Image (cartoon, helix red, strand yellow):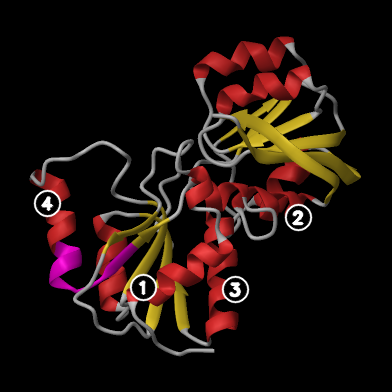
Amino acid sequence: MIKSAGSKEFDAYFRSILDIDGFSAADASLNGLQVDNDGGTISKIAFAVDACMETFKRAAAAGAGLLFVHHGLLWGNPLRVTGLYRERLKFLLDNNIVLYACHLPLDEHPDIGNNAVLSEKLGMKNITPFGLYHGRKIGYKGELAEPLNIDAAAERISFMSRPPAVSLPFGKAMNTTCAVISGGAAMEAVQAIEEGIDLYITGECSHSVYHFALEGSLNMLCGGHYLTEVWGVRKLMEKTAADLSIETLFIDVPTGL
């Protein structure tokens, strides 16, 4: 158990939990350590969904030496260090904050991932992987322990009582099966229809999926990209605090999308 450590030690810890290397071919995100510090020790870790200036400023104000995010700054393509990107990078360097990102490995994790936590909150059982993406299934499907209507399901996955972004009640009044993929997975609703799922839950909606859901008699709940992806971040925060006896905090910067 540690109360402070360097960035390399925290990198090793997160890699011991999350399959970062296993997703290197499937995930555009540059998962892992994205911005390092000057080599100093870290005694507080902030956790957030997005790498953005608001999150950076709140992490700095709280005295966090490392910021763990689901959506990082680097997504596989080289970026010019200009404009807003330069300002973000400069702020991290000026404040000596380590930026650590983990995208699909945190969505997929069977215990602390976004989709695993959502499945737990919905009371799903007999859970199996669902949602093929670049050769990996990153979501989950299963039976609901008790039948739920779409409004009750929305309440169960709500963070801080925030309503879902979009609700498409095109199926049964009461759902007995459900599939979940957090974030931007609207078109995977077609896979849910093909597999006979009653209720499909994701983050963002899409105009293109509306008529598929309608014609497929699918109930679809789009909780919001942000609101479906706070769960894995928070679960990892709790595990990190318990495992390492280090101070942690969650930075909530909702987008409503």
| Magenta residue span | 91-99
Spatial CA distance of label 3 from label 4 is 33 Å
Q: Mark 2 = which residue?
A: 120
- Asked whether 97 falls inside the magenta stretch, the response is yes
Q: Nearer the viewer, residue 162 or 77?
A: 77
Residue at image mark 3: 239
Return the residue found at the far left: 82
- Who comes first in sequence, dot 3 or dot 4? 4
Q: Position of residue 50 (x, y in %)?
A: 38, 53
Between the residue at mark 2 and the residue at mark 4, the CA separation in whole angstroms equals 40 Å
User: Callout 3: helix, strand or loop?
Assistant: helix
Q: Position of residue 215 (x, y in %)?
A: 72, 9
Residue type at mark 3: give it.
Answer: Lys
Q: Quadrant of residue 48?
A: bottom left
Q: Are marks 3 and 1 in contact (CB under 8 Å)?
A: no
Q: Residue shown at 59%/30% (left/top)?
A: 135
For the residues labelled 3 and 2, the Cα–Cα distance comes to 16 Å
Q: Quadrant of residue 4?
A: bottom left
Screen quadrant of the C terminus: top left
Direction from residue 127 to residue 252 in the image, left or right:
left
